Image (tube, rainbow, N blue to C red):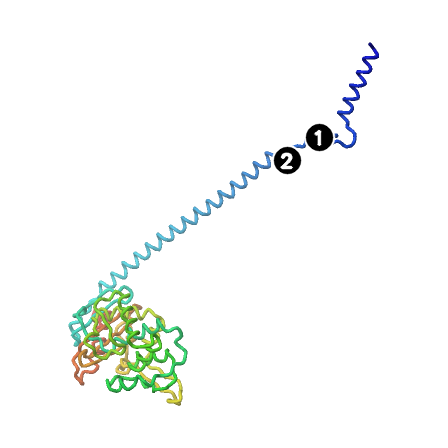
Amino acid sequence: MKKTFKKKSAMHSEVISGFDRPQGGSRYADKQPERKKGIPKRQAAGRRRRRDSRLLIWLLVILMTAAVCLAGAWIFSSWKEKQTGKTQKLLDQIQVDLTKLDSPYAILLDDETGTVLASKNGDDRIYPASMVKIMTVLTAIETIDDLDVKIQMSYDIYDALYEQDASRAGFEPGEQVTARELLYGALLPSGAECCVQLALESAGSQEAFVEKMNANAEKLGLTGTHFTNVTGLHNDDQYSTPHEIGKILQAAVKNKTFYEVFTTHFYTAPATEQHPDGFTFWSTMFKNMTDEAVNGGEIIGGKTGYTDEAGHCLASAAKIDGRIYILVTAGWAQDTNSATYHISDAFLAYNQIAPTESMK
């Protein structure tokens, strides 16, 4: 019995030994269970706290930025409202009597706001004559890509201008010029050849360019204005009102290039084959002034116009006490002795905006 026990024990020992220590490198040999890898709880909690802190900081930054923006918007709104109130108070104090003017049609506008400060038949239909060239030049500036590229004056445009006795700046057929020079030629001496050449450069024909001018008028919300040509020569279907001419000029003077041309007294075109020494032309308004000063400022620019049907016209601007004002007059009778009465009207109107101490 003892022997049997030993045998079983040996067998049992052999089995256990074989199980515990298998030979031949069994995959179970001395293998310890792996500890699951991971971030210690304390370290993970620290990371969460840091992440939450960053989120809180970003949230605070966003809230503070929003608060600053809202405060800034409120301050700007309050400032703008205050400035608007000051502007309106200033404009309300202006008392201009346009009935004293010789021109039967007139209107005075504040350039910044478009406020009508005084009117004398300002919404009546008129023939605009060469005040049309304000829109011609503005449209050319907006539609010609490069104002400094050389252009040859077309030979084909002159016969019609001669027949119509249209005013000219002095550029000759075939002369090499730039669109920028033509802008000065159109606005200052009222050169019809410049207007027609600008139209050809921009749209290929006068008719196509006039369509652009009328589209511009529509964009400005003008319902009482219609253009049929680029020069202002009379056409029964070409008309506007002093008010709407004023709106066109209001839009135009906000264009940097237009403003530069419009406020120029004279311009000297560079030398060409036709003009070896160049040539100089003057603004038709400034050449009839001995002094552009008015109470509190000066007249800074203007575009005259005249046809038998339109009479003498003037769309001008003055800077007085830092503000720009626009005056449009039209319809003064075609009397040769009163050729500058429309300019005298401008002085009479502008001098009422900022009266002298003796007048206050």
Q: How many marks?
A: 2
Q: Which mark is residue 32?
A: 1
Indicate which disc residue 327 carries.
Answer: none
Q: Measuring from the top left, give residue 52's x and y in whole percent.
A: 51, 40
Tell me which residue sits at (66%, 32%) in the image: 35
Image coordinates of residue 24 in percent, x first then y, are: 78, 32
Return the disc, 1 or 2, that comes first in the chain's sequence.
1
Q: Quadrant of the N terminus?
A: top right
Task: Name the residue rendered at 35%, 77% in the picture.
Answer: 201
Q: Position of residue 44 (x, y in %)?
A: 58, 37
Q: Quadrant of the C terminus?
A: bottom left
Q: Quadrant of residue 339?
A: bottom left
Instruction: Identify the amino acid type marked 2.
Output: Lys
Label 2 sits on a secondary structure element that is loop
| Residue at the limit of the structure toward the top, as seen here | 1
Task: Give neighbour class at mark 1: few <14, some 14-19, many 20+ (Cα, 10 Å).
Answer: few
Q: Which residue type does callout 1 highlight?
A: Gln
- In this image, 222 relative to 3: left or right? left
Using residue 47 as the reference point, say whether residue 136 is left or right of it. Answer: left
Instruction: Report the residue marked by disc 2.
Output: 37
Q: Which residue is at the front of the view, 330 or 318?
A: 330
